[in-house]
Image (cartoon, rainbow, N blue to C red):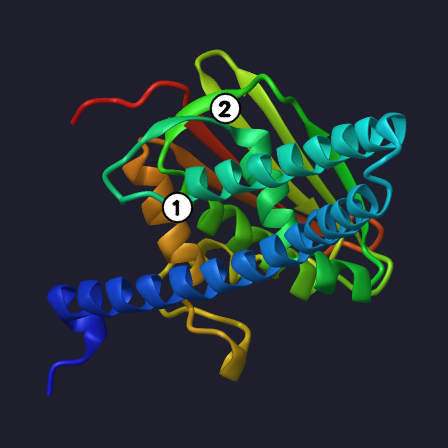
Amino acid sequence: MISPASDPGTMQEIQDILRRNQELVIAGQFAAMVMHEINGPLEAVHNLNYLIQQEADNVSHVRVYSNMLEEQLATLTKLSRQTLSLYRSPETRESVAISTLAEAALRVHQRKISIKRIILRKQLKADVTAEVHAGDMLQVFSNLISNAVDALPENGTLCVRVGRCAEEASVTFADNGPGIPAPILPRIFEPFFTTKKERGTGLGLAISKSIIEKHHGRIRSRSTTRPSRNGTTFRISIPLSAKVI
């Protein structure tokens, strides 16, 4: 019997299947977050429309309510456009603000971040854009944030930075969790390698590395378990312009 580890074709098929499943999970989480954010403006639109009907004879009040209603509709339009920009065909690469993707990935995990009372420190330069497949990059960022949140204790710290270095976008995720033991660190990008036992597939980082490399980028890790200096950092570098293979 040929094991997945010894058959590259079988391993690739498994990775592709699990990657698609992971995409669906993240898309579902993102959809739930978007619906939560949409609910507020929708409720405001409903209430403002009621006030306009009730005070139809008061022109000045109607004008104020109409302006407020337009603001809420603009918010809904913005959310809709952001969501559509994140999920297009895998072949589509567009110039995207990397900070927007980082913010979207953080919102996906906002509930877990809040429950563990994690201190979030963000340095997100809004003018850093790169030609990427937004859905794939959201998946990578979500993987790294999920790993950090799982590793962090209550009141731990997660730092997310977006910047630019020469002709590359630089994205850093750093936590002050327990760190990854030195003997394990070289293996974390190996397919099916996991320290989460029954909770992990061992493919999250392998898939993330594959996605970054398809964008002609690099992903590097640094970690230490030394007391008072413990923690893990992942740094992603992505070309600002898509390269033609």
- Amino acid type for the residue under numbered disc 1: Tyr
Q: Which mark is residue 214?
A: none
Vertical position of residue 157 compared to residue 115: above or below: above
* Camera-nearest label, 1 or 2: 1
Closest to the observer, 173 or 104: 104
Residues at discs 1 and 2 in contact (Cβ within 8 Å): no
Instruction: Determine which residue is flagged by label 2.
Output: 169
| Residue drawn at 60 percent across, 22 percent down | 163
Instruction: Determine which residue is flagged by label 1.
Output: 87
- Amino acid type for the residue under numbered disc 2: Ala
Q: Is residue 82 visible?
A: yes
Vertical position of residue 42 compared to residue 128: above or below: below
| Residue drawn at 23 percent across, 39 percent down | 91
In the picture provided, is 56 more to the left or to the right than 180?
right
Coordinates of residue 90 in the picture (x, y in percent): 27, 44
In the picture provided, is 186 more to the left or to the right than 227?
left
In the picture provided, is 76 more to the left or to the right than 94?
right
